Image: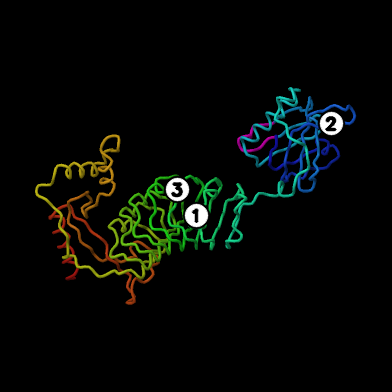
């Protein structure tokens, strides 16, 4: 039985001599195993503690030699073993909670004199330096020759960068790093993202700059990334669009979509209420979705897109008189916030309701509406705006939808009044 953690051995007699303990643990490997007692020539069970300074280790007898266990904070990876002889406290911290529980259980059995054959014992040998070195939290690989082929990635990594390694897919070994907060796979040849990236529940930053991505899957949008992902860089890829479910990533603060082939932004982008930095420069965006007006940004860059100044009289009419029953029922469901789900109605109807348009009057419309575009000053949604065109403009066309001819007529009247002032 072995345990990797931080350990401090405190002599309880020190205060008697006016000496204070250091109060700080050091990285250690603890083992429970047999050792031949030279005085009695009997095999006894010992606890051995090895550190970087003491690779050979210090041994402490366990049988009938434990005065008390302190396990109040064992769920946090902390515990203390108080020994009778010598009078020391072995303070453990930064251990895996489950491993610590198993280790303490084995120590307790050894103290009670359990049959040696029933104990999970280890060989008490000196350790290698790498076994007691502080776990790596950050690793950067920027060359294919440095990429680990036979050894795995350190389990303790919180930041991992693998760039310029010509990766064509995400290495599944990376997806076992549960502590990972930042994953940088920029400048590779990745074409598709595995859905299991969504299992990295601590991932706050995902950088995929300059790859060959053609899509961003719905599964990722519905994964635990909804609660953790704050920074996403998809710039310099081959994206044509993002799924409607993309706006479920509501913790996003910084989103980079530059230099793709995007012809639209997510329809419900206004739901990204925490988004503060958005760049989608040099794409193929002809206009912005109506929900764009709900954003509250600090910095916005939409330069290099083929925006044109719209004419509100240029419109598309998709209306029927009278409205179909399905359209009327759907509008009522959205307007009155009636709960729905795939357990109540077909899944495709749920999707239609999710992407319902909002008329200027505030009511919903789904498949029957009047659509046009109007110019919007981007300073209405962002404090800082990179110029949209060479004419020092900060305006871009935004889609508008109207649920009826009445609403569209009122909009035209207001537009005419503004233009004549």
In magenta stretch: residue 76: yes
Q: Are marks 1 and 3 in contact (CB under 8 Å)?
A: no
**Pointer 3 local density, CA inside 10 Å: few below 14, some 14–19, many at least 20:** many
For the point 46% across and 58% down, which residue is it?
190
Q: Is residue 182 above or below residue 378?
A: above
Q: Nearer the viewer, residue 339 or 18?
A: 339
Q: Which residue is mark 3?
A: 225
Q: Nearer the viewer, mark 3 or mark 2?
A: 2
Query: Along the horizontal axis of the image, is 200 left or right of 140?
Result: left
Q: Position of residue 112 (x, y in %)?
A: 74, 23
Mark 1 or mark 3: whose residue is earlier in sequence:
1
For the point 27% across and 57% down, which residue is it?
290
Q: Position of residue 121 (x, y in %)?
A: 72, 31
In magenta stretch: residue 177: no
Q: Which residues are magenta?
A: 70-79
Say which element carries label 1: strand
Residue 205 got which mark?
Answer: 1
Q: Position of residue 303 (x, y in %)?
A: 36, 69
Q: Can you say which quadrant of the picture contains the N terminus?
A: top right
Say which element carries label 2: strand
Query: Along the horizontal axis of the image, is 228 left or right of 336?
Result: right
Say which element carries label 3: helix
Residue 36 got which mark?
Answer: 2
Mark 2 or mark 1: whose residue is earlier in sequence:
2
Question: Residue 285 lies in what quarter of the image?
Answer: bottom left
Q: Nearer the viewer, residue 403 or 237?
A: 237
């Amino acid at each position: 039985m072995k345990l990797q953690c931080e350990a401090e051995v405190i002599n309880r007699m020190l205060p008697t001599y006016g000496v204070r303990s250091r109060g700080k643990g050091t990285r250690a490997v603890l083992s429970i195993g047999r050792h031949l007692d030279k005085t009695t020539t009997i095999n006894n069970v010992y606890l051995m503690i090895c550190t970087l300074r003491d690779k050979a280790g210090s041994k402490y007898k366990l049988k009938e030699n434990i005065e008390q266990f302190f396990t109040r904070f064992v769920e946090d990876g902390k515990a203390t073993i108080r020994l009778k002889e010598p009078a020391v406290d072995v303070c453990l911290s930064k251990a895996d909670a489950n491993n610590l529980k198993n280790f303490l259980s084995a120590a307790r059995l050894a103290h009670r004199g359990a049959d040696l054959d029933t104990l999970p014992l280890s060989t008490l040998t000196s350790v290698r330096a790498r076994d007691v070195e502080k776990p790596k939290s950050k690793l950067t690989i920027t060359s294919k020759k440095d990429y680990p082929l036979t050894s795995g990635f350190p389990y303790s990594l919180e930041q991992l960068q693998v760039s310029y390694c010509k990766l064509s897919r995400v290495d599944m070994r990376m997806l076992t790093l549960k502590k990972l907060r930042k994953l940088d796979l920029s400048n590779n040849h990745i074409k598709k993202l595995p859905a299991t990236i969504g299992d990295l529940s601590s991932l706050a930053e995902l950088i995929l700059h300059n790859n060959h991505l053609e899509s961003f899957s719905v599964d990722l949008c519905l994964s635990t990334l909804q609660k953790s992902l704050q920074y996403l860089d998809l710039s310099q890829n081959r994206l044509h669009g993002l799924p409607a479910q993309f706006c479920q990533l509501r913790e996003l603060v910084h989103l980079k979509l530059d230099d793709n082939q995007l012809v639209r932004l997510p329809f419900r982008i206004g739901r990204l209420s925490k988004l503060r930095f958005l760049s989608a420069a040099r794409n193929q965006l002809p206009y912005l979705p109506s929900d764009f007006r709900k954003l509250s940004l600090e910095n916005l860059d939409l330069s290099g897109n083929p925006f044109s100044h719209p004419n509100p009289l240029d419109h598309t009419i998709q209306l029927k008189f009278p409205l179909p029953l399905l359209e009327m029922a759907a509008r009522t469901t959205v307007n009155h916030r009636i709960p729905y789900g795939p357990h109540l109605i077909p899944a495709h109807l749920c999707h239609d309701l999710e992407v319902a348009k909002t008329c200027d009057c505030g009511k919903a419309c789904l498949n029957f509406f009047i659509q046009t575009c109007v110019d919007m000053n981007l300073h209405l949604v962002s404090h800082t705006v990179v110029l949209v065109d060479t004419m020092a403009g900060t305006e871009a066309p935004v889609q508008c939808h109207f649920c009826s001819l009445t609403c569209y007529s009122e909009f035209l009247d207001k537009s005419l009044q503004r233009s004549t002032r």
